[in-house]
Amino acid sequence: MALARELRRRLAVEIVRKTEGLFELAGIPAELVKAFSKRSRELDASASADDRDQQQRRSRQAKGEPTDILRRQAWKDEVTALGYDADIIVQSAVGRRVAEHPLPDWTMVAEEITAKDSCPRVRDARRKITEHLVGFNIDKSSLVEIQRQVISERFIDLGFDTSREAICTTQAVLRAERRIVDIAPKIAARSAHALHPSQLEQALFYADCDHEQVLAFRAATSGRDLTVIEGAAGTGKSRTIGMVVEAYKAAGYQTLVTAPSWVATKGLGEAVGSDYSVLPELLNDLRGNKRWLPPTSVVIVDEAGMVGARSMASLLTEVESFGAKVILIGDRHQLQPVEAGPALSLALERLPHESYATLSTVRRQRSASDREQTLRWRAADPDAAFEAINFARAQGTWRSVKSEEQAADSAVDLWASFQAADEEVLILARTHAELRAITDRIRKKLRDSGQIVGEDAIILAADRQGNLFDLPIARGDQVRIGKRVRKKGLINGSGGTIQEISTTQDGVVEIKLLVDGRIVSVTSEELRDPESGGLKIRHGYASTTHAAQGVTVKNTIVVAGTVPTGGAPI
């Protein structure tokens, strides 16, 4: 923020605020910004720790020394090579009449801060407030006062967390969470969708299930209009829901499967033979009166543990108003919601025991030892975690390395071995930075083997948060689509292999993909994110754990990162 303020004060430049506290200068061509950003990342990626130390020492030398002059000339040469005149660019960026912009809408900022964390730390809220003030002519004392005022007026003090850090929340978050706690028992008290005992017995007569699944089936069909079925991955939740859907459809009810992601929604919907709609789209349609739920509707929410408080409150409100039934399926011990608020836990707080069923037996893994291992990883207990690690070491499925670079190398080597054996495999990572490192290595292997051919086309893509980045793609690349393209039959998460890339005379990029055995042509305009302007497409070689939730594959490689233990990374 200080840098932006001083540039504005001394040179009269116009600051264009970006995300995460970054900014650009108005008047500098977008192509140049893009090229220099890419070049800086290339230089940073190629530099070793020693190189960076030397660069930092050189950068502390007095301005005007030979190294500084050479550096300026090198950048000027790159500008010229891109077809621009550096002096003209400076003239267009400096000495502008900078208009004062109104301060941000602090209510919207508070919603942004609590979008993914319902109880953020106060220092994180202050940092976000500062990011939104980049480019404003505000001194330090004024900044402190604005932070104090925004936090006191827009946030509620929650005291301290377990680390003795001050935390806060907003009225909007509290309203959503209170709504869940209030409305869940009201829906559960209704029993308008109970199936007749004869219908239950008929459904169970042909069912291939065990006693635990029968209990879950009865809980979901024999009474309450709000039921929760909870269980770890591989415990047979989908199989049980298949029985529920079949029984309700046979009795004349309409079933609708939904989930936070299109991958999970489509996967369960098609597996159980039900209509389906991804949760954000369903809520938008219901709020906008574009869709309604008949009283005979049974709404099935998969991956309910990943639904945030605001979405869950909205869904339960709609279900209650239409007189429908809702079944929540999930696991509070799996990934936390991307959206803020532990909705599934809140819904369970005041539900009667008749509205809850649990599936605890792992059925997906073949051996008893693998089934036990699944439950160890889920336990969120230090002792169970150490048992899981020791078991994985003994099985040869745990690799300890000394750096993140070695972790990426090891993951890609494993991926290549599965590929060579023609076995399905998915790499999971925690961060987008890890994904990029893994993807770069995989693409190099594929280029070396001739599976990726031709020059890279660089497109401006956008991630889930709307952050823009350069995405190199070429023929043979595996990619995933990040938005729904209805007329092409593509959903958010559809994967395909690039067959051809072309650009029309008016600059529209056309990508031909092989998707599930058919050729699909999609354009840059169809993939464009209306807010950021980037294309919603990414490489498909690896995924974050959240993005892969609901996906079932035979082999998974998890890049867990580093954890310091006695000075040595795991």
Image (cartoon, rainbow, N blue to C red):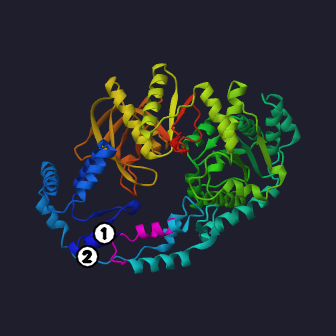
Q: Which residue: 65% across, 35% down? A: 388
The residue nearer to you, when weighing 151 against 481, is 151
Q: CA distance from mark 2 to mark 1?
A: 9 Å
Type of amino acid at the residue the image marks with label 1:
Ala
Mark 1 residue element: helix
Type of amino acid at the residue the image marks with label 2:
Arg
Q: Please tell me whether residue 131 belongs to the stretch shown in magenta.
A: yes
On the picture, is 459 further left or further right than 144? left
Looking at the rendered structure, which numbered label has been put on residue 9? 2
Marks 1 and 2: in contact by CB < 8 Å? Answer: no
Residue extending farthest to the right is: 197
Compared to 555, does 467 lie above or below? below
Looking at the rendered structure, which numbered label has been put on residue 4? 1
Q: Residues within 10 Å of mark 2 (few under 14, many from 20)?
A: few
Q: Quadrant of residue 68?
A: bottom left
Q: How far across and down, in percent of the image, does residue 310 sit?
A: 61, 61
